Amino acid sequence: MKNIEWNRTDLIDESEEVVLHQTAQQKETLEHSRGIEIEEWQEKRVKITKVNVNALGEEQIGKKKGTYITLSIPTLSTEDKDGFAQMKETLLQSLGELHKKLKLTAESKILVIGLGNKTITPDAIGPYTIDSMHEKQSELQNPSFILYAPGVTGQTGFETSDYVKALTEQIKPALVIVIDALATSGSARLCRTIQLTNTGIHPGAGVGNQRKEISEEELGVPVTAIGIPTVVEAPILIADAIDVVFRSIAAKISEKGKPSSKLSVTNWTPSNEEIDLKVIEPIFGEWATWTTEDRRQLFEEVFMTHPERLVVTPKEVDFWLIQYAYLLSESLFEWVSKMPSGQN
């Protein structure tokens, strides 16, 4: 098959060169290279992936040098209070880790930019968070942040980066935090992941509408990007759904005749256990044993003939964004409240 660039994602731990499409040997080689350091660990239900990229690594994988921290709870739901509490706790730790070299104090000026279009829900996490922070900050006597939601280029006619640069030159903050919606190449990651990085951000890059970057190189001050993946491309969603169907049927065939199968009263639930897909080859043919990546390539080739490239978002995306806007707002204010005073 023709190799097509279908894997649009803003998450570094999903990039083809880093994790998902590496063989075990390739991944081990990458992890021990001098350009990239990858750490993965679990804290309660939160899976944490930390990737450090230096100048050599930037050439190797095409990602800017810096630190990327990804937090994910695959089982998170909109009403999962315990899950969001764990995500907040881990986010606070990650904020401290990412900014420890900046020596920020309680008096430091921090400019928070909420990117996105408030009228398009999947793209509204930035403005939603700014609204939540405005409400929180109105209760405080001493404002902790300078907050701004600039809209998008299609609304204003100007590059968002130019707005942010003008604000930065006027305010002279110690740090700029940019909050934006991201794209993911894994349907299970939708609205269940937070990525933080000190490399800045290219607004719209994940859905092929890349604008001028917002970064330390452009603004002259440190920039932290915080993103929530809210969209995934349709071919990826279809391929993932078919993968679940194939694994479900294969699991049921493998269980047939076993005493345990007679006790089953629920639908099959996806798991990480190894399932032999060759048992369904007589039903669906050889393509049933293809890798998920090969099936995604097939669907991408089919959809390339359509005039529109579709992206998909969860139907409950508005509830997700309300939860995340509150989580990010509360986390940022709590993080600032723990900073030491710069006054002697």
Image: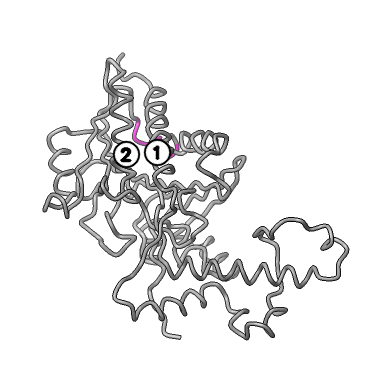
Of 19 and 124, nearer the camera is 124
Residue 97: x and y in percent read 45, 38
Q: Which residues are magenta?
A: 97-103
Instruction: Examine the rendered structure and indicate whether residue 344 appears above or below residue 333.
Output: above
SS type, badge 1: helix
Residue 233: x and y in percent read 40, 65
Question: Is there CB contact under 8 Å for labels 1 and 2?
Answer: yes
Q: Is residue 100 magenta?
A: yes
Relative to residue 119, is residue 240 drawn left or right? right
Q: Which mark is residue 7?
A: none
For label 1, the residue is: 322
Q: Which amino acid, mark 2? A: Tyr
Q: Which amino acid, mark 1? A: Ile
For label 2, the residue is: 128
Relative to residue 8, is residue 211 drawn left or right? left
Residue 197: x and y in percent read 38, 47
Instruction: Give the spatial CA distance, label 1 vs label 2.
Output: 7 Å
